[in-house]
Amino acid sequence: MAFVDHLEALRWHVVRSLLAIIILAIVVYINIDWIFDHIVTGPVQKDFFTYTWLCNLSHQLHAGDALCIPPININMQTTAYGGQFISSFTIAFVIAFIIAFPYIFWEFWRFIRPALNPKEIKNTRGSIFWVSFFFFFGAAFGYFLLAPFTFSFLANFTLGTHTIVETRPTLTDYIDNLVDIILGTGIAFELPVASFVLTKIGILTPTFLKKYRKYAYIIILVVAAIITPSPDWMSQTIVFIPLMVLYEISIAISKRIYKKEDEATKEWS
């Protein structure tokens, strides 16, 4: 195919992906009030699952209130007449994108599939499932664990001792932070998939990952600091630990793939 033909094919993949997002966004918008009350504002409500579960777990472990997150008591505001109206569209399209992520990746896969040889197609079998799995796992981690810790810290942090400053965030600020947390962790949790792909095409080796492990941990700390809007060490640790575990899993995956590729090369020789 000529370059223009490739662009034409890509255009239709993009169009279908956008149509999927728009259709899902309409469905979300129809139920926007329920979604806003029970999902979007969940991490800042006192009866959110994470708050009650961690507190009950703390009591079952006879640790008192060690794991209990301080309750959040804030009222959000908008500073423009159209603030709530615009935010409703933002919520609808972000949720639609998250739900449609497997389909979007499938369209991307359909675009690049003709350029792969049969062996490469066989090696990437199941990629849509694993990419989607780690993305949703990371997004759920950000929503159910990281977001409550982050918003609890920020809402209960006080400057000075006279309590003359009141935290009253805007709705836009809250949504921006929540989206950054969910999408940030969703993308960050793709580390094992990236390790698999890069090892397959010969860019990464397990030796390289082991050699630069300490530098990778520093990068992971920086990523954790970027993903978490709050500067407290607890939220950053919550992100750092699973990313560190995922890095070690990536080393194991790379080692296994590299060993298979090496054995296949020897058999071919």
Image (spheres, rainbow, N blue to C red):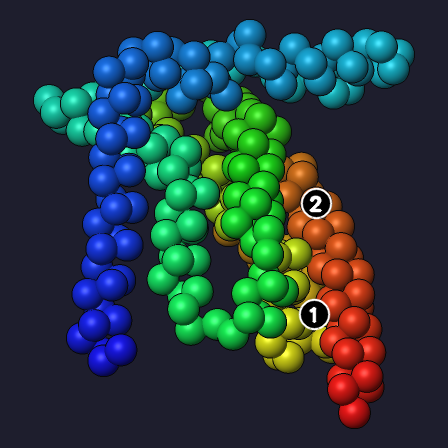
| Image coordinates for residue 9, horizontal then vertical, percent | 24, 63
Residue 194 found in image quarter: bottom right
Q: Residues within 10 Å of mark 1 (few under 14, many from 20)?
A: few
| Image coordinates for residue 185, horizontal then vertical, percent | 54, 44
Whether residue 262 sits left or right of residue 97 in the image: it is right
As drawn, the label of residue 1 is: none
Identify which residue, 124 or 57, lies in the foreground. 124
Q: Image point 36% across, 62% down: which residue?
A: 111
Question: Is residue 56 visible from the viewing direction of this image?
Answer: yes
Identify which residue, 191 or 227, lies in the foreground. 191
Q: Residue furthest right?
A: 62
The answer to whether the residues at label 2 and label 1 have Cβ atoms under 8 Å apart is no
Residue at numbered disc 1? 215
Which is nearer the N-term, disc 2 or disc 1?
Answer: 1
Count of picture labels:
2
Residue at numbered disc 2? 242
Q: Residues within 10 Å of mark 2 (few under 14, many from 20)?
A: some
Secondary structure beneath label 2? helix
Whether residue 34 sits left or right of residue 216 in the image: it is left
Q: Amino acid at mark 1?
A: Tyr
Secondary structure beneath label 1? helix
